[in-house]
Every structure is written in structure tokens, then in C-alpha cells.
Image (cartoon, rainbow, N blue to C red):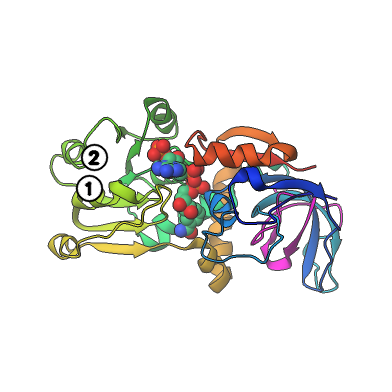
Amino acid sequence: MKAVVCKQFGPPSSLVLEEVESPKLKDNEVVVQVKACGVNFPDTLIIQGLYQFKPELPFTPGSDIAGVVKHVGSNINHVKPGDEVFGFVMHGGYAEEVVVPGNACFIKPPMMEFPIAASFMMAYGTSYHALKDRGQLKEGETLLVLGASGGVGLAAVELGKLMGARVIAAASSDTKLTLCKEYGAAEVINYTTEDLKSRIKELTDGKGVDVVYDPVGGNYAEPAIRGMAWEGRYLVVGFAAGDIPKIPLNLALLKGSAIVGVFWGSFAMKTPKKNMKNTMELMQWYAAGKLKPHIHKIYPLSEASNALEDMMNRQVKGKAVIECS
Ligand SMILES: NC(=O)c1ccc[n+]([C@@H]2O[C@H](COP(=O)([O-])OP(=O)(O)OC[C@H]3O[C@@H](n4cnc5c(N)ncnc54)[C@H](OP(=O)(O)O)[C@@H]3O)[C@@H](O)[C@H]2O)c1
């Protein structure tokens, strides 16, 4: 089978597409013929050796997959060969076939196309866990989303609106912000041309926002925290800007506020039942037409490195997807 292989940590251009052996199956696993694999920011880090864990070289990146079951291990009885599924793996998705742990492999709703199914788990799973479980977002509250047109950001905008919040979307261009408005943002801030903290204050009559969803970090984190309301919650989702911000803790004291970490992958592994419940709720919303994942572009497997480069150059709006077979 063909797979995109990372033989040495480096930029996307160092990835190679080559013929590799088909994956071997264990009792609790499922071999899936991958139809589509979503591109996520952690993929850009993992190939550079900059992510929380470093896989042994050589390896294939890609976590969010959708495809057709080819073989099942002897302990698997919730899916069978021929079933259309979506699932989550640590890596290995940018390939024609991948081995998925049985407990991370789910039947795909028939109306959900493969590219959409491969764009769903990480973006919506992370943002729903963040807003619901970690941020305790309530109806009527104000939510600020940074990097709001990105994969997890746009999902947070859509979910925030669905959960009854007034959403303020912040991003780096007016084109990106137009998309955020289509996904439910009531107000927008262009943080490359406007001062983030003063605009937050203007848009909230000086009160500040109740919840900040931050997948960007860098220079935006501190002004966002300074723009929070009393008892606000700042959600630490990621550091796409590269720098991990260092925050003066007196800000948390002065606002009676909380700085709350979000790590969806660990949440899903440590509390699979809670994650399953969230996934079911998200699927119900999807089936009811309330969630519409935005696909930026579908890239062939041979152009996986272009997809990663586009993401690193901040060109992707919503989700980039790789068509694998
Ligand atoms: N905690 C978790 O469980 C979890 C789960 C999934 C992802 N994440 C993290 O969330 C972040 C976003 O992931 P994603 O897949 O949504 O990525 P994405 O689609 O590329 O979105 C990231 C956004 O960050 C902004 N950005 C600012 N500076 C950037 C830079 N130097 N390079 C790239 N983007 C920059 C961009 O928006 P503007 O151009 O508008 O600024 C971009 O739209 C990543 O840090 C990822 O690791 C965390």
C-alpha cells in the first residue's frame, strides 16, 4: 500500500510517498481502508519532532480517518468488513490503510461523506469538550474564539452559537472573519489591524467576555485574558503561533478567573465513556443539520505535504483533508 512517510523529523517537504507493507492486525484492532484523513495542526508539529510525543522513525502522520473496514481482530464485534467507519489514531492516517484501535473506531452515519467524517472528531471533539466540560459555557454568556477560522476555532464558533452563547470571533483577515460570521459569530475582531483588548471591551460594554477559547497563544493570550469578565474562564487549547505565553498570575486573582487546560486526546483516552457521550451529542447535531464542517480543500495523498505547508502558512480555513484511496 502507499503511505506518506516521515523518515527524519523536518518540514513537510521532507515527507515521502512510498510503497510500504500493509499494517498487521492485533485482536483488539481494525484495519481500515482509508478514504480520507483530516489534517490537524498537531500533524505539522509531529513531523518536526515538536509534538508532546515523538513517534519512532519512520512513521506516517495523520490522526482523523474515515474509510471502509477491511479486517477486524478476533475481539472486535461492533464493526465488520465492509462497514463505513471513522476513527482516531495516534498517527498513520496519511496512507491507503491504517490500523485503528477498536475503541476508537465508530460506524459512520450514512449521510456523512468521508471527507466530512475525517474532519469531525478532532475539531468538534476538542471544541465541545473545551466549551462544555472545561469552560462550563452557559446560555447567554459571551465567548471569544481566537484563530476562529481554523479547524478547532471554526468548530468552537459554531458550537458556541449552538450552545446559546454570543460569539465574538477573532482572526487575522477580513476574509477569514466573513466565514466566521457565516458560522454564527455575532461580532468579529481582526487582530492584525485592531487592538484585541480594547475591541473586546467595546463589544461587551466594558464587562469583558465570559469564556476565551485560545488555540493560538503567542501575543494574543494576554490581551484576551485582560479582556475577560469577572469569573471568566480562559481555555488553553493550543499554541499555533509558536510561542507559549507566560501570564502574570495576578490577572487571574483580579478577575476571580480560571485558566483551564484542554487536552481532548487525553480526555478521550482517560474517560472514553464521557467522550462517547459527547461524540453522540455531536453526531445528533450533525444529523439534525446543525453542524456543517467547512472543507477548505481536498488534497490527493501525493500532495499531503502541500496541505501541511498551507496550514503552517495560515492559509487553511476550516479543514484541509487528504484523499487517501
Ligand atoms: N488541546 C487539544 O486537545 C487540541 C486539539 C486539537 C488541536 N489543538 C491545537 O489547536 C491549535 C489549532 O489547531 P487546528 O488544527 O485548528 O489548526 P489550524 O486550522 O491551522 O488553525 C490555527 C489558527 O491559528 C492561527 N495562527 C496564528 N498564528 C499562527 C501561525 N504562526 N501558524 C499557524 N497558525 C497560526 C491561524 O489563524 P489566524 O491566521 O486567523 O491567526 C489559524 O487559523 C493547534 O495549536 C493545535 O495543536 C489542541
The Cα atoms of the two marked residues, 1 and 2, are separated by: 6 Å
Where in the figure is residue 200, as x and y percent of width and height?
21, 40
Numbered circle sitting on residue 196? 2
Q: Position of residue 213 (x, y in %)?
A: 36, 51
Side of 268 relative to 235 (left or right): right
Residue located 80% across and 48% down the image: 18
Q: What residue do we see at 33% from left, 38% from top?
A: 170
> Which element is circle 1 on?
helix
* Residue type at the position of mark 2: Leu
Quadrant location of the C terminus?
top right
The reply to whether discs 1 and 2 touch (Cβ–Cβ < 8 Å) is: yes
Mark 1 lies on residue: 223
Q: Residue at x 20, y 48 (%)?
A: 227
Left or right, residue 163 beside residue 295? left
For residue 172, which quarter of the picture?
top left
Q: Quick check: 199 above or below 140?
A: above
Q: Residues within 10 Å of mark 1 (few under 14, many from 20)?
A: some
Residue 45 drawn at (x, y percent): 53, 54
User: Residue 113: x and y, percent?
Assistant: 70, 39
What's under tag 1, amino acid-wise?
Answer: Pro
Which contiguous range is marked in magenta? 81-109
Q: Is residue 60 visible?
A: yes
